[in-house]
Image (cartoon, rainbow, N blue to C red):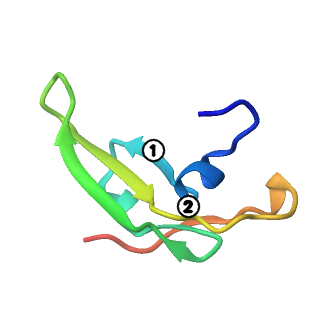
Amino acid sequence: MLVGETLYERIGRRPLHGMSHDPIIHTLRINGILVDYVIETTNRDGDPLFFWYFSDFPPFEGDREDIIISFDEYE
């Protein structure tokens, strides 16, 4: 990656990802946008671990306090 080059300029999208121990992550919404993918795996102890990501999260302009993170019911 070149100095000053953003990830968006390099790959043409804005990925956003994380890990969770709770399966409710399947219903994660950030500013109303549902997570694109959730991949279930296990941690070293064999407990469920979920890798989640948005493949191209839209840019957000505003304060951190304006970000809305929500979850739907998960069965």
Q: Residue at x 87, y 62 (%)?
A: 62
Give the number of callouts. 2
Relative horizontal placement of residue 62, taking residue 67 as reference (left or right): right
How far apart are the alpha carbons under marks 2 and 1? 17 Å
Viewer-closest of 39 and 43? 39
Q: Secondary structure at mark 2?
A: loop
| Label located before the other in sequence (2 or 1) | 2
Relative to 26, does residue 47 appear above or below in the rendering? above
Q: Within 10 Å of the Cα at label 1, are there few (<14), some (14-19), or many (20+) other Cα atoms?
A: few
Residue lying at the far front of the rendered structure: 2
Q: Which residue appears at 66% of the width and 33% of the height?
A: 2
Identify the residue shown where x is 87% and y is 57%. Answer: 63
Residue 43 percent coordinates (x, y): 21, 29
Above or below: residue 52 compared with residue 2: below
Residue under label 2, please give it: 13
Which residue position is annotated with label 1? 18
Indicate the amino acid at tag 2.
Arg
Q: Is residue 42 above or below residue 15?
A: above
Choose top left, top right, bottom left or bottom right for residue 46: top left
Q: Are marks 2 and 1 in contact (CB under 8 Å)?
A: no
Q: Secondary structure at mark 1?
A: strand
Quadrant containing the N terminus is top right
Q: x%, y% of residue 18?
A: 45, 44
Give x and y (percent) for residue 21: 33, 42
Q: Residue furthest left?
A: 46
| Amino acid identity at mark 1 | Gly
User: Is 7 situated left or right of 19 in this image?
Assistant: right
Question: In this rendering, would 38 be left or right of 8?
Answer: left
Can you say which quadrant of the picture contains the C terminus? Answer: bottom left
